[in-house]
Amino acid sequence: MDPSFERIMGNQDRHFQVQTHAPGPQGSLPLTPELLREAPSGDLFGWSQNVGMGWSPGRLLGRQVLVLGTQGGIRNEDGSPAALGYHTGHWEVGLLMKAAAEEITGAGGIPFAGYVSDPCDGRSQGTTGMFDSLPYRNDAAIVMRRLIRSLPTRSAVVGVATCDKGLPAMTIALAGMRNLPVVVVPGGVTLPPMQGEDAGKVQTIGARYANGELSLEEAADLGCRACASPGGGCQFLGTAGTAQVVAEALGLTVPHAALAPSGQPVWTEMARQSARAALHMAEAGLTSASVLTDAAIRNAMVVHAAFGGSTNLLLHIPAIAHAAGLKVPNAHDWAEINRAVPRLVSVLPNGPEYFPTVMVFLAGGVPEVMLHLRKLGLLDVNALTVTGQPLGAVLDWWEGSERRSQMRRFLQESEGINPDDVIRSPEYARASGMTSTVTFPVGNIAPEGSVIKSAAIDPSVVDEHGVFRHIGRAKVFTTERAATRAIKTGGIAEGDVLALIGRGPLGTGMEETYQLTSALKHLSFGKHVTLITDARFSGVSTGACIGHIGPEALAGGPVGKLRDGDWIDIRIDTRKLEATIHMVGSGERPGTPEQGAAELEARGPHPMMAADPDLPDDTRLWAALQSVSGGTWKGCVYDTDLIIRTLEAGRRALAQEEAKS
């Protein structure tokens, strides 16, 4: 026999004695004649399985609570890896789930646990793995809801998740369970290294090395230390951190839950608090629909603006609203809120001081920001939270709480950081030049709109009136790989407009292009380059980066007609939050938007533009379904009624064609 086969099979001698029967659990099920006559067989067999897994027959009548998480990897008892997870964000989630389960058990309940692990956008940057990133969110939410419904005896759900797609998927899933008590447990954040770079900047070591701005030794050292603690989302307020902030702003978490340091006592206690909240909701008859209202959605958008959150939440908050059966916010709603709400949080990656997210937590996190927003009259304080208390009562508690005073004092005394420098008053924020978060450029390239995190444009390229202006020639790319190669090899220069087209949902599943945005931020000339695309950005992206351009190129959008050398005229007013993006001709000098529109109208699509040949069928199906349902500006959701109507119309059209032939 081949030696490799022998190695695979190993020594089998000790495995030949096989037990064929077992005595079974001791005791008896708490059955009654009524249960035997009336209860579904699944309920009764469920009890058999519960005791088969070791649960005491005498404790089968407790309230059943599902603890649903995104745990990944396999941890040994000492925390070391038996098998790695995809990312730190879900590596320690099991500890939160265990703490919640222990609390449920201690209260006489019966905890169940289910898992739907999640991918890492950082790990898949620049790879074909990114084609599955945003579609995963929809799929995971569906699977999570199926798991919830597949435990018919559950009386509440505790959802434990963090990071870019896992937490939005969990929040969407729970929003759809309108008649159940639900609580979200954010998975927390990892710590920054004492010496080194955060997990956002460190993702640029390749581009900086290629441009001679970093040595091999420096890159190797920085890359090793960036994730300084083993669990939690990245240290910056990207999509992972923003999703936690939004979950709390929606009222779906206990107070001061977002951005807690993973693995620490305050973090596990938050899971215990969440379990108690879920049990209280079940006892009080409160459900997801009690908390998730139009007012809660608006509160979340207000807090998103005050934090300067990731633009990816423009995809996720509408999807949460859709799942909850609420009004879906549109670009006008976002613009209105961002004009009214000051940005108050000084945090990575936006600044002006680059505090990591754990410092935001110590400064008071979401409730501290909400205290300022309440004074400005920007919140609906009657919105209910999962504690059973309205937001106003929660903020009253927070304002005078020992928790608030001790954490802010700890930040000041132990870290030497004034908490009011992290979470600023509106007056202080204004005086330090902090502008509102996002702006929505429109123009002949983006007739349906686009988005830019205007708060993150480098201040040195914004004039004294708060206006960013760039008129430059386009360099057009139809793959991220080609654009990245151009940045690394000198193909992109100061003054260029880098146009990446055909990378929206139909092209790549709407890939995230942080590989490009991060390189531009951390290269010396990058602040003088504007990026425009129908793809999306990581929440840690900064600079003049315009994404979500609609219609996307492969859906016939004019951005798909751009050519090398076209003049692009971009104007972003970071104070008034007004912006335009136009193609203004292709001659020796720039022309007018009208001339550019006429030229685009006469052109066909870029000859190199096509859906990525490696795009999986799963993602192609997702792209088609979300496109029918309203596309990116509706949150890339599945509108079931609209999809069914479209299919029926298509079926009728096909039948008519067949009848004619």
Image: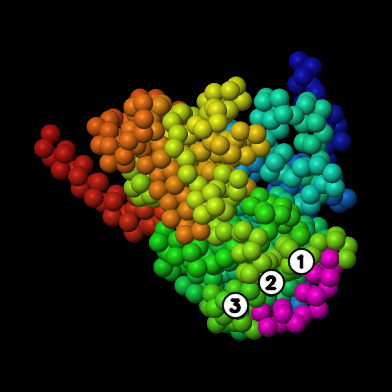
Q: Which residue is mark 1?
A: 419
- Quadrant location, the C terminus: top left
- Point out the stretch of residues depicted in magenta: 394-412
Q: Quadrant of residue 280?
A: bottom right
Q: Are marks 2 and 1 in contact (CB under 8 Å)?
A: yes
Q: Quadrant of residue 111?
A: bottom right
Q: Nearer the viewer, residue 603 or 33?
A: 603
Q: Amino acid at mark 2?
A: Glu
Above or below — where is 505 with respect to 350?
A: above
Which mark sits nearer the N-terminus, 1 or 3?
Answer: 3
Residue at the spot 68% in from the left edge and 58% down from the top edge: 346
Mark sitting on residue 368: 2
Q: Nearer the viewer, residue 409 or 48?
A: 409
Q: Secondary structure at mark 1?
A: helix
Residue 181 in magenta? no
- Quadrant location, the N terminus: top right
Q: Residue furthest top?
A: 2
Residue at the spot 27% in from the left edge and 37% down from the top edge: 595
Above or below — where is 141 with respect to 184?
A: above
Q: Measure the alpha-carbon separation of dots 2 and 3.
A: 10 Å
Q: Nearer the viewer, residue 329 or 95?
A: 329
Residue at the spot 47% in from the left edge and 59% down from the top edge: 576
Which mark sits nearer the N-terminus, 2 or 3?
Answer: 2
Residue at the spot 28% in from the left edge and 30% down from the top edge: 604
Q: Which residue is mark 3?
A: 374
Residue 50 shows in this picture: no
Mark sitting on residue 657: none
Which mark sits nearer the N-terminus, 2 or 1?
Answer: 2
Q: Measure the alpha-carbon separation of dots 2 and 1.
A: 10 Å
Side (left or right) of 266 relative to 70: right
